[in-house]
Amino acid sequence: MARNRDGWWLAAVISPLILLGAWMLWPDPPRSTPAWTSPEGTARPNRTIASQWQRPEAAAETPADRETPSQTTSEQADPAEPEINLDRLQDALANIAIDETGNLVLDEIALASLRQAFRGLEEAGPETLEKLKLYVEAGLAGDTGAQAARILGNYIGYRKALTAAEAEWVELEDLAPREKLERTIELRREHMGPLTASQLFAGEDAHQRYLIAMEEVRADPQLSREQRQEALTRLRDDLRSGALLVNSEGTDAVENLRSERQDWQSMGLSEDTRNYLEQQTLGLVAARDLTGSDRQDWQNRYDQFAQQRNTILAAGLTEDEKAQQVEGLMATYFTEEEVEAAHNWLPQYLKAEINRE
């Protein structure tokens, strides 16, 4: 069962420095650490960009040997373009981990590194950005360099687009924080790709959903003191459980997890199996938006899937057999793209169990 569980739950790390800017205040954080964060002692891969980087001299020479229309030299460079400190760029990206397959580990450290790399590049034009990408690609061997260059370029494109969008959003007085968050998420997906954006930002987005929802609850005049406290407690539970990692708008699949957890426990299912089933649900909800599935069609298919899943769980099978059949059931009701997104919507190496209080 552990193997199946680990294959599903890809835990996210929350960045503690999440600002909602001018559009909301930062309320008190939850007292307990969300259970889906990287647990203390979780090992990151030993390889990093720093350990795999080629000698700066060799890396700096390689782009000059390439024939590309966007290639520039110091003499050809636009004087309006900012100077590039390649050493600073290398230092900014140094701590990004590389897994055993050569792929970058897109965790909170990778996100912090990208933010650091972006500093000073706000006004950089296409020629400068192309030079940066060539430098990064040359500094790392094989597909790792190409991936790092692509992600860096896409992140810079996203940040520039966000700056332009925020200038427009300032004029929209009725733009609610929740709507601004969803627009920001859409910008990330557009510029970085749905899966990359999810892997980098899912934990941060969960925190923002939590903070926005807390403000909405506190500002709701229709709630009694007891109702408000109950709603805030539920929000903290949702943050700890990982329910806020996904956008549950338009589906009751996440809300139903509250009662389903109790049903699964009444069936005698182990904590490992219950965690596996819960993370499967969250992954499928995430996949719905990552793949752009029609929400009503997805809901119809999910309802049929959930019904068949319950039949399997109630059958006289071992827990491993139940898990295998439930996992296989996904291919019946969901597309290959949706199943892949459900597996990969969070960083692969941050596999952690949900430990409930």
Image (spheres, rainbow, N blue to C red):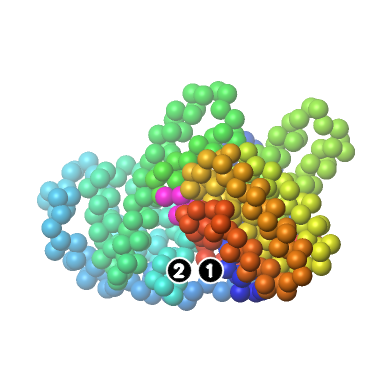
How would you rate the neighbour count of disc 2 (Cα within 10 Å): few for under 14, some for 14-19, many for 20 or more? many
Query: Which mark, residue 242?
Result: none
Tell whether 1 sits left or right of 291: right
Q: What residue is disc 2 on? A: 97
**Residue 210: x, y in percent?**
67, 45
Q: Which residues are magenta?
A: 193-198
Q: Quadrant of residue 212?
A: top right
Tag 2–tag 1 contact (CB < 8 Å): yes
Would residue 341 be counted in the magenta stretch?
Answer: no
Query: Which mark, residue 349?
Result: 1
Tell whether 312 sits left or right of 93: right
Identified at 24% across, 68% down, the residue is 59
Q: Is residue 102 visible?
A: yes
**Residue 18: x, y in percent?**
58, 48
Q: Earlier in the sequence, mark 2 or mark 1?
A: 2
Q: SS class of the residue under badge 1?
A: loop
How would you rate the neighbour count of disc 1 (Cα within 10 Å): few for under 14, some for 14-19, many for 20 or more? many
Quarter of the image that includes the N terminus: bottom right
Q: What residue type is disc 2 on?
A: Ala
